Amino acid sequence: MIVEERVGVSAMAVVRADGEYRLVANRRISKGELLFTIEGELTTAPTRYTVQVGRDTHVDVPAEYDFEEILDRFYWRFMNHSCDPTVFVRGRAVISLKPVDFGQDITFNYNTTEFDMAEPFSCRCGNDRCTGSVRGYRHVSAEERRRLRPWLASHLAAGSR
């Protein structure tokens, strides 16, 4: 896994609060910074926890890893959704959209990678731009598609669907 580090401090940490796990910044992160590369097993079967990286390709955590190893090696799995995210996914690279302060959540907009969510859900991000539900790119309005275009994964941007 490629993780950019400065002075030996990892850019991310997984924390648990109110029964939920979150990926947060472990140091100040600059806009445009490559944070890490999503590593894992390629699959054609989307799940609640996979990230779509191609038309019919998703990245998942290999089954042989226990929870502690997932926390240490596959922490991308704990990136939550936000309609006003702090990062975007380009291929498998996770890049900051804006400066991120220490302790701030590392989030991405799931509608920028997922064509159709395996498990749609009601969004709770509370942002002014909140769409209310997260079902995948296929389900967003034309206006939301225009807004998301700069951050879309290539398999969605290419209009292959």
Image (cartoon, rainbow, N blue to C red):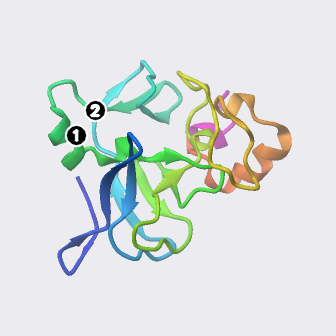
Q: Position of residue 12 (x, y in %)?
A: 32, 61
Instruction: Judge whether 79 appears above or below 139 on screen.
Output: below
CA gap, disc 2 and disc 1:
8 Å
Q: Position of residue 55 (x, y in %)?
A: 53, 29
Q: Position of residue 86 (x, y in %)?
A: 54, 61
Q: Is mark 2 in CB contact (under 8 Å) with mark 1? A: yes
From the image, tell me which residue sits under label 2: 61
Q: Reply yes or no: does residue 126 show up in magenta.
A: no
10 Å neighbourhood of mark 1: few (<14), some, or many (≥20)? some
As drawn, which residue projects farthest toward the front?
A: 18
As drawn, which residue projects farthest toward the bottom?
A: 7
Q: Which residues are the magenta region?
A: 155-161
Q: Which of the 4 quarters of the picture holds residue 69?
A: top left
As drawn, which residue projects farthest toward the top?
A: 45
- The amino acid at mark 1 is Ile
- The amino acid at mark 2 is Val
From the image, tell me which residue sits under label 1: 70
Q: Position of residue 37 (x, y in %)?
A: 34, 53
- Give the residue at x 65% y 31%: 160
Which disc number belongs to residue 142?
A: none
Q: Which of the 4 quarters of the picture holds residue 18?
A: top left
Q: Nearer the viewer, residue 98 or 68?
A: 68
Q: Looking at the image, tell me whether mark 2 or mark 1 is earlier in sequence order.
A: 2
Callout 2: SS: loop
- Give the residue at x 65% y 43%: 157
